[in-house]
Image (cartoon, rainbow, N blue to C red):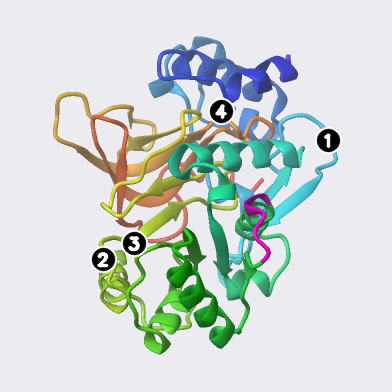
Amino acid sequence: MNCELEDKIFSVDEHDFGALALEIFHFQSRHNDIYRQFIGELNIDPSKVADIAQIPFLPVGFFKRHDVKTGAFEPEVIFESSGTTHSGNSRHAVKRMSLYRNSFLKAFQQFYGSPEDWHIIGLLPSYLERQHSSLVAMVDELIVQSKKNDSGFYLYETDKLIGMLRKNEQAGQKTLLIGVTFALLDLAEQYQDELRHTVVMETGGMKGRRKELTREETHTLLKKAWGLPAIHSEYGMTELLSQAYSHGDGLFRCPPWMKIVLREEDDPLSVKTTAGTKPFLNGIINVIDLANIYSVSFIAVDDIGRLYPDGSFAVTGRMDGSDVRGCNLMYGI
């Protein structure tokens, strides 16, 4: 059955998303010990869950305290978040790297086309300095897939990076510069020139390196430095195997096997799956990532969001505190 579910994930469409999500929920509620216990603590009978809105979402903090695995397996890779001294690191045990590779390559192709069309530059110093980063693994594979000799990571090689950007601009070579926020801001202070053939994608992350800025403030500075109409963004995290992308309008869009729904802050089990006829809905973000078949596909994160009728979403803030209110029943087990 596992293989049958895997085969369905990357061919799913809007029409059959709900049915596949329920099929994966029932699979995980049977074979994931942590998730099954969590559902039990909520007094929910999995056999009676017949709609996405009824699925319980596991608080993301469980990945810091437990091995969240569906089935018994030795993972091919374990991704870890950077964490803090206060919160600790999340750990995501990935049964097969091919699932993650399929997810990010298919999503990239959907939103940006073939990696071979791009010269890909990774400006990810804080991530390269530690092991087990899912972001580094993704960008590394995109660099390989680009098949350009000068695609690569640039770690504290500012002059070389600036020279590469100038060379690509003169040649009219499509370039994707993907970087953490503080590194992109550092680069913008040292290099100001019009980038007509370069897409800049920020992945978030100050990590205490600079004064915290809002995404809008960051994008304004970067656009001014490089004469860009927009700054792209990626929405992903260690606990997921899929990413959403923004082309600079402040709205993130998901690949077909990923979906955002919202929950109420004071009632985490109250889930809204669509904005319907309303202009938008506000709430706390829950993520459905069907590629997470061997961990948990239904995760309650700590971001505050706005959901639009077409399924796109904006991230408008963070919850106070790291634990989801009303859903920390099992953090001590």
From the image, which quarter does the C terminus lie in? top right
Q: Which residue was labeled with disc 1?
A: 73
List x then y, in percent, for residue 153: 63, 70
> In this picture, is 66 found above or below 122?
above
Residue 35: assigned label: none
Instruction: Answer with mark 4 or mark 3, whichever residue precedes in sequence.
Output: 4
Q: Earlier in the sequence, mark 2 or mark 4?
A: 4
Query: Of marks 1 and 4, which one's residue comes earlier in the chain?
Result: 4
User: Answer yes or no: do the residues labelled 1 and 3 have beta carbons within 8 Å?
Assistant: no
| Vertical side of 97 occupied by 126: above or below | below
Q: Which quarter of the picture shows residue 134?
A: bottom right
Q: Secondary structure at mark 4?
A: helix
The amino acid marked with disc number 4 is: Ile
Q: CA distance from mark 4 to mark 3?
A: 40 Å
Badge 2 or badge 3: first in the primary sequence? 2
In the picture provided, is 258 more to the left or to the right than 311? Answer: right
Which residue is disc 3 drawn over?
Answer: 231
Asked if the stretch drawn in magenta spans residue 146, the answer is yes
Q: Nearer the viewer, mark 2 or mark 4?
A: 2
Q: CA distance from mark 2 to mark 4?
A: 38 Å
Amino acid bearing label 2:
Glu
What residue did someone put label 2 on? 216
Counting residues from the start of the chain, the first of labels 1 and 3 encountered is 1
Q: Which residue is mark 4?
A: 39
In this rendering, the label closer to the viewer, 1 or 2: 2
